[in-house]
Amino acid sequence: MSSYTITTRVDGETARKMDDLAQATRRSKSFLAAEAIQAYVEENAWQIEAIREGVKKANEGDFATEAQVNRFFNKWKKNAR
């Protein structure tokens, strides 16, 4: 797997916490940063795919009808009491 170098800035408090975490886990700050970025990307990447799928369906004209939308919202309106 290829690796890439990136540079980022963090505030002093975050840097101190990262130092403490690196020492406690016997990992480098670079390792911790890479792990954090990977977790963030994996956790949020689904949104990009969902947006792409929505745009594809919209471009194909695949929309809910006004009646379908009204039924959906009316269902929740009635059950919200």
Image (cartoon, rainbow, N blue to C red):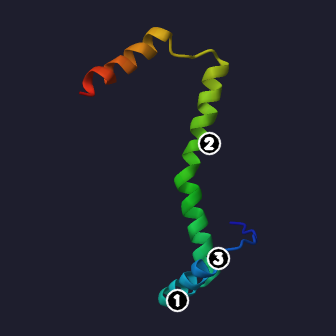
Element type at mark 1: loop
Above or below: residue 34 compared with residue 46: below
Quarter of the C terminus within the rendering = top left
Q: Could you give the CA–CA distance between mark 1 and mark 2, rounded to whole angstroms?
A: 34 Å
Q: Is residue 25 visible?
A: yes
Element type at mark 3: loop
Query: What residue would you read off at disc 1?
Result: 26
58 or 14: nearer the viewer: 14
Q: Amino acid at mark 2?
A: Ile
Query: What residue would you read off at disc 2?
Result: 48
- Reading the chain from its start, which is encountered first: label 1 or label 3? 3
Q: Amino acid at mark 1?
A: Arg
Dot 1 and dot 2 residues touching (CB under 8 Å): no
Residue 71 screen position, x and y as percent: 38, 14
Element type at mark 2: helix
Looking at the image, residue 5 sits to the left or right of residue 35; the answer is: right
Above or below: residue 59 compared with residue 12: above
Q: Could you give the CA–CA distance between mark 2 and mark 3, rounded to whole angstroms?
A: 29 Å
Looking at the image, residue 54 sits to the left or right of residue 3; the answer is: left
Q: Could you give the CA–CA distance between mark 1 and mark 3, rounded to whole angstroms?
A: 22 Å
Q: Residue at x 57, y 87 (%)?
A: 19
**Residue at the extreme front:** 81
- Reading the chain from its start, which is encountered first: label 1 or label 2? 1
- Reading the chain from its start, which is encountered first: label 2 or label 3? 3
Residue 61 screen position, x and y as percent: 62, 15
Dot 1 and dot 3 residues touching (CB under 8 Å): no
Q: Residue at x 71, y 73 (%)?
A: 9
Q: Nearer the viewer, mark 2 or mark 3?
A: 3
Residue 21 screen position, x and y as percent: 51, 84
Residue 47 screen position, x and y as percent: 57, 43
Query: What residue would you read off at disc 3?
Result: 11
Q: Amino acid at mark 3?
A: Asp
